[in-house]
Amino acid sequence: MKTTSVLIHFKPEALDHLEDLGMRYDLVKGELNVYVDDIPYEIVDGVYQDPDEQLCEHYGIDYNLVNCIELA
């Protein structure tokens, strides 16, 4: 199976959160950027969950600190 990378753009105030998670990040134009492997989307108990929120939940990321998520 081919792995797809995802780029997550964070607000600057996410710095402590990312360091607590041990995630490597790049600072680009005032944003913190993190690359992670994408995960397959799953519907749990027939309930729709936003795929971006599900990705963040998988990695323990606070979704409120995210600016946007895109395929890398």
Image (cartoon, rainbow, N blue to C red):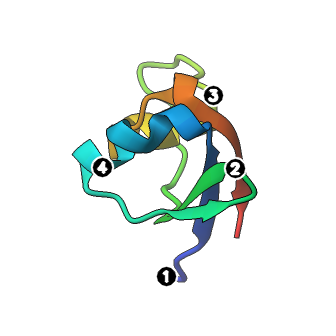
Residue designated by label 2: 30
Question: Between marks 4 and 2, how big is the CA–CA gap?
Answer: 17 Å
For marks 1 and 4, give the one nearer the viewer: 4
Sequence-earlier tag: 1 or 2 = 1
Badge 3 marks a residue whose secondary structure is loop
Q: Can you say whether 22 is above or below 1 in the image?
A: above
Q: Locate the C terminus and report the quarter of the image it occupies.
A: bottom right
Tell me: 13 left or right of 22.
right
For marks 4 and 2, give the one nearer the viewer: 2
Question: Between marks 2 and 3, how big is the CA–CA gap?
Answer: 26 Å
Residue designated by label 4: 19
Amino acid residing under circle 3: Asp
For marks 3 and 4, give the one nearer the viewer: 4
For the residue pair 29 and 6, the one nearer the viewer reads as: 29
Q: Is residue 5 visible?
A: yes
Q: Can you say whether 50 is above or below 34 in the image?
A: above
Badge 1 marks a residue whose secondary structure is loop
For marks 1 and 3, give the one nearer the viewer: 3
Q: Residue 50 carries which label?
A: 3
Residue sitting at 34 percent across and 39 percent down?
16
